[in-house]
Amino acid sequence: MSHETLLARWNDHVTRRGDACAVSAPDRTWSHRELADQVAGLHRLLTSAESGGAGRDAEAGGAVLVVCADPVRAAVALLACVAAGRTVAPVDVRQPAARWAAVLEDLRPACVVADRAGADALAAAGVAGVVLLRADECAPGTWSGQHLEPAARTDAGYVYFTSGTTGRPKGIRGSLAAVAHFVDWESAEFRVGEGTRVSLLTSPGFDAFLRDLLVPLCAGGTVCVAPSPGVPVGDALVRWLAEQRVEVLHCVPTVFRTLRTAGAHAGSLPDLRVALLAGEPVRASDVVWWRELFGDSKELVNLYGPSETTMTKVFRRLDASDTSADPVPAGRAMPGVTVRVLVAGAPATDAIGEVEIEVPFALPGYLGTDRGGFRPPNRYRTGDLGRIDADGTLVLLGRRDQQVKIAGVRVELGAVEEALRDHPAVHDACAVTADHDGDTVLGAYVVADASAGDEELRGHAALRLPAAQLPSVLVRLSAIPRTLSGKVDRRALPPLAAVRAAAGEDLPRTPLEQEIAALWSELLHLPSVGRLDDFTLLGGTSLAMARLLDALRTRFSAEVALRSFLLDPTVAGLAVAVEEARAGRPAPLTKEASA
């Protein structure tokens, strides 16, 4: 399938089945025709705005930065950019302020498309002097076949920003041809067709959003948009999947495992056919649990592929042989893709080396001059270590650098260290990960003056790093142990779990606060937490927040809104919110109750 048929294939459903459901969102449903008319309205704004750059790629300054928290508005913006032949660059609205400047400097967008949350985020970060188009205030237009013409003439592609080794976000350029190759494969491989209901749990700021959106749209299926903010987990995820009659589920293993803690059983998820897991390693215990519930009736699939090569390039249908595998194999290459393991620069079998992926389309590389692992025109050295067995199956065995995945989000340990070292009181830092009860925990060892407390260091890092890259544990050392060559002696570092105890005056005061603090410790893998500690600064990501609120619903029969928690994300503040929820009263809008 050539890239221009991404829009053409969707247009076929707009033309033939315009009244069929294209998007099922929490607040309403959108038919293919209604969605297309929204795209046409924003397309009109894009082409009439005095922004210049139409038809130019991101390197020439013709890109469109998309800053939308609402997945439907982000989808409309993405499709409008493709129709206008413009490079589209979606970003997460929750970025720390320091990242906005780097994104704008590297991308040099011709204009910005934002919804209300996105516009507020830009204003809070002090972003000014950009042409701003409001996706949520745009009147619909009339979609027609003429909207297909610019995309047929040019493959302007997309840009997604990911973590860089120095803390500066790195822009990955991708092509529509690459997206089309993936869409065509998944639609055929997993029988996604007219009416198939596919989950969308991904934030618009991650490239998997392209998968969750374009696979069902181009096949004539329905995009099922999860409630926001946050990803539903546990009981909420089970209910949502059942209510939405989701047939194809995409998620990271961390989210998938919450189905188990929710007590999903053999009668759960009656419409689900396949669960596709990507972004983190799958464990044998995941396969054991799934097969005990569903046997062969519902497929469980492991997906692997770096963002640089556009989503999945290796896959494996997990079966009984994987219930005792350590590690669970990544699988074999999808059609048209070649996977090699390089040892001393040469392909090898049954030997450990760096994984290289060759794809049937050009790889544009990164914004700027950084070539990284790209080998023009169509090969990428991933930095992952692996082995190819005699039958061609790829087994992943870690990284050759400091890159890790936390809940499916790429994290550069060097970027975490740089953010901490940037504080004037910090003399040295070392970021690490540890496995606690099956979850990957991010921590950091710091050599710092006593004048700067942990909360100050966390707040400083939060100005430079997204929540997923904030260390949940800070360990104070007099010096980072190093080898004679100057490298960190990681074997000499104390265990992360041995570190943090709340100060006496900060201990939880009431039985409810003690229960909530214990729950935090369980979720964040900390030995203890204080009543005034900030959940986000302890490394509590949006996924961790969703798991926390789901646990409150189960343990305390309290429906605490995410907004209420964010007003005061402390143990003390959450205790007040739980009490108010139990009493059926709204939580207070200030922090006075927790003081």
Image: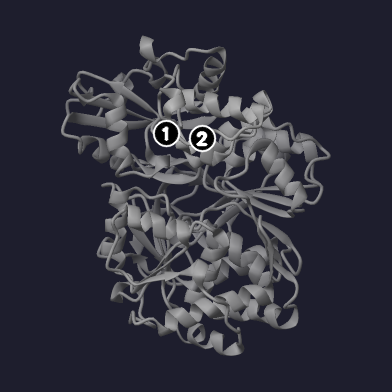
Label 1: few (<14), some (14–19) or many (≥20) C-alpha neighbours in 10 Å = many
Which residue type does callout 1 highlight? Answer: Gly
Number of the label disc, if any, that sits on residue 565:
2
- Residue 497 visible in the shown view: yes
Query: Would you name the residue on which mark 1 appears?
Result: 539
Corner quadrant of residue 38? bottom right
Q: Residue at x 51, y 85 (%)?
A: 152
Quick check: 276 above or below 429?
below
Secondary element type, mark 2? helix
Q: Can you give x and y, in whole percent of width and height, for residue 16 in the image?
A: 74, 82
Q: Is residue 444 above or below residue 170?
A: above
Instruction: Name the one closer to the observer, 573 or 90.
Output: 573
Furthest-top residue in view? 504
Where does residue 187 sit, x and y in percent of width and height? Answer: 67, 66
Q: Position of residue 452 (x, y in %)?
A: 22, 25
Instruction: Name the quadrant of the N terminus.
Output: bottom right
Whether residue 337 is situated above or below residue 206 in the rendered picture: below
Of residue 85 and residue 72, the one placed in the foreground of this image is 72
For residue 131, side relative to residue 38 (left or right):
left
Identify the residue shown where x is 77% and y is 53%.
245
**Residue 390 appears in the figure:** no
